[in-house]
Image (cartoon, grey):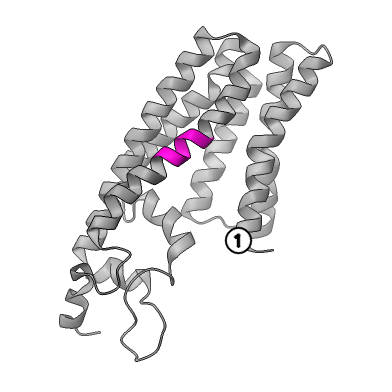
Amino acid sequence: MSSRSKALLLVLIDLVLPIGLYYVLRAAGVSYHAALLISSLLPGLSVVANLVRLRKPDGLGLFMTAMMVGSAAISLLVHDARFLLAKDGWVTAISGLWFLASVRGPQPLVFAFTRFLLDGRVGPLAGDGGSRRESWDVLWTRLPAFRRIWRVATVIWGIGLLADAAVRVTMAYTLPPDVVPGLGGLQYAVFMVLMQVVMACYLVPTGLYNRWSPLYSPLKEIPA
């Protein structure tokens, strides 16, 4: 299965199916709380499957696992329907804080997420005369400007997640309960599109996607 197919499958399991299941349960007469509880536990299936497959999750896997486990724990322990509706907002807020905290860590979270998609596809050619792109390990180690880009990008994402969380919590406590799950799912799509635009406006001018960019010129001056 390709990376794109895996990503689509995860979106289906973690986002589309829970929302669909919630409305099916509500149509069947299940209470708000029970429908929210049952549907919110569904995304944990992908986490369990991934843990069984990998056994030892990396930093990115640890982040995703912690978010899913925390979300499931909230669902099981909290009995207030409004709080459960706001759960995605609280989890998103924690994610935003985690992003911001990772800026001071060895490698910020946005670097880890993006590397999974673009390592080997973005960057200058390696200095071996071939067509292979330089490893992001090399870029991270040798280029302070490259490291700064991903730390700033992580701050942008952290702030964006906190803003998204504020909107989700507000919706959960002010809108009719049956409106919130569907609107929250739509918000994921809107948020992702907006963040892609914001990140493009930041990353493209840095020269990240241009292999001849001055960003990468120090590599020619630093011996391997």
Residue drawn at 48 percent across, 21 percent down: 168
Categorize mark 1 by other alpha carbons within 10 Å: few (<14), some (14-19), many (20+).
Answer: few
Residue nearest the viewer, comparing 19 with 41:
19
Residue drawn at 53 percent across, 40 percent down: 66
Q: Residue furthest right?
A: 28
Residue 129 screen position, x and y as percent = 34, 91
Q: Main secondary structure of the magenta part?
A: helix
Q: Is residue 82 magenta?
A: no
Residue drawn at 29 percent across, 57 percent down: 204
Magenta residues span 189-194
The quadrant of the image that shows the C terminus is: bottom left
Residue 79 screen position, x and y as percent = 64, 12
Is 35 situated left or right of 174 in this image?
right
Query: Quadrant location of residue 183?
Result: top right
Residue drawn at 23 percent across, 58 percent down: 206
The quadrant of the image that shows the N terminus is: bottom right
Q: How many marks?
A: 1
Query: Quadrant location of residue 70?
Result: top right
Is 145 situated left or right of 74 in this image?
left
Q: Is residue 37 visible?
A: yes
Residue 81 screen position, x and y as percent = 62, 11
| Amino acid type of the residue tagged 1 in the rendering | Ser
Residue ID for mark 1 = 3
